[in-house]
């Protein structure tokens, strides 16, 4: 058999710079990009000049700083539009955000993180930025717990070793037994909850989206400030809304309900959130 072709070093380096720009906030100087990407300044400058000529980056002539360019925006929009789950979910998400006044988010699993495909928000959960394209940990989010429902316990442990269950707040799930209980709730109740596990003052409910093969391919969530969600009184209402949205998208993807085995009908104890 022919050997696998070696990775192209220039492409890898350019991708590292684009990633650093995507993860940054505002314009970034070439020296800071070089440090973030682990590259020399001369290499970084040459790559940035090429990417600028291709409209992948834009340079502020006065400050000498860079940001992502119009081609990067075009590519991001095209990537979203090529996702069937995005196309099926987008309008329903906007309708729900308008009705509830809260944030509605769509994500898929990308390795050991979730990747936001789309988000929209209502007046009770405004954002000055888009989540699209950003990543978050699986174990500390309602979306992540819903996505992990597509794996069995062994698969979750292989994907997320115990030392990867990082605490972001005092409420973050940091052991697999507790995470198993959270995922079991998704499988029996239909939706996950997350209360201040990733960020203080924030909460969400989320539900998995399945395809025609009954595989979990994405998840949707309803999110916002604790006071806006008021989960102590609205958990079931919002959980049902997330579940119905997920079911609408799943049905469009060809999903058909599968009967649960008898042992799965015994619901586990309710979690704290």
Image: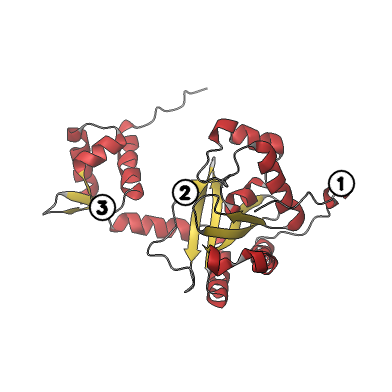
Residue visible at 57% across and 72% down in the picture: 96
Element carrying mark 1: helix
Question: Which residue does the numbered mark 2 point to in the structure image?
Answer: 135
Does the CB distance between marks 1 and 2 fall below 8 Å? no
Residue visible at 44% across and 53% down in the picture: 133
Element carrying mark 3: strand
In the rendered structure, the answer to whether residue 128 lies left or right of residue 228 reads left
- Sooner in the amino-acid sequence: mark 3 or mark 1: 3
Element carrying mark 2: strand
Question: Which residue does the numbered mark 3 point to in the structure image?
Answer: 67
Q: How far apart are marks 2 and 3 (CA)?
A: 19 Å
Q: Which of 98 and 163 is in front in this view?
A: 163
- Around disc 1, counting alpha carbons within 10 Å, would you say few (fewer than 14), some (14 to 19), or many (20 or more)? few
Q: Which of 14 and 25 is in front in this view?
A: 25
Residue 142's spot in the image, x, y percent?
A: 60, 53
- Around disc 3, counting alpha carbons within 10 Å, would you say few (fewer than 14), some (14 to 19), or many (20 or more)? many
Q: Can residue 209 be seen in this view?
A: no
Q: Can residue 203 be seen in this view?
A: yes
- The label shown at residue 263 is 1
In the rendered structure, the answer to whether residue 154 lies left or right of residue 136 reads right
Residue 106's spot in the image, x, y percent?
A: 54, 59
Q: Distance between the residues labelled 1 and 2?
A: 34 Å
Mark in front: 2 vs 3: 2
Residue 2's spot in the image, x, y percent?
A: 48, 23
């Amino acid at each position: 058999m022919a050997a696998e072709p070696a990775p192209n070093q220039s492409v890898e380096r350019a991708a590292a710079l684009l990633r650093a720009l995507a993860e940054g906030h505002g314009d970034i100087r070439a020296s800071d990009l070089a440090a973030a990407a682990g590259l020399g300044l001369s290499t970084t400058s040459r790559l940035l000049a090429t990417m600028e000529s291709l409209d992948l980056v834009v340079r502020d002539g006065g400050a000498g700083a860079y940001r992502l360019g119009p081609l990067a925006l075009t590519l991001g929009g095209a990537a979203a539009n090529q996702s069937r789950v995005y196309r099926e979910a987008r309008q329903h998400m906007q309708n729900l955000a308008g009705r509830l006044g809260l944030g509605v988010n769509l994500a898929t699993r990308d390795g050991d993180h979730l990747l936001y495909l789309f988000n929209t928000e209502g007046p009770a959960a405004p954002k000055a930025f888009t989540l699209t394209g950003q990543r978050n940990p699986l174990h500390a989010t309602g979306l992540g717990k819903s996505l992990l429902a597509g794996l069995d316990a062994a698969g979750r442990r292989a994907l997320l070793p115990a030392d990867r269950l990082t605490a972001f707040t005092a409420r973050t799930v940091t052991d697999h037994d507790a995470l198993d209980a959270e995922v079991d709730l998704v499988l029996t109740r239909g939706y996950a909850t997350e209360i201040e596990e990733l960020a203080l003052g924030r909460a969400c409910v989320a539900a998995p989206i399945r395809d025609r093969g009954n595989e979990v391919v994405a998840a949707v969530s309803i999110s916002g400030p604790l006071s806006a969600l008021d989960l102590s009184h609205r958990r079931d209402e919002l959980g049902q809304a997330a579940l119905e949205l997920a079911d609408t998208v799943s049905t469009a993807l060809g999903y058909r309900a599968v009967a649960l085995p008898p042992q799965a009908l015994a619901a586990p104890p309710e979690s704290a959130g």
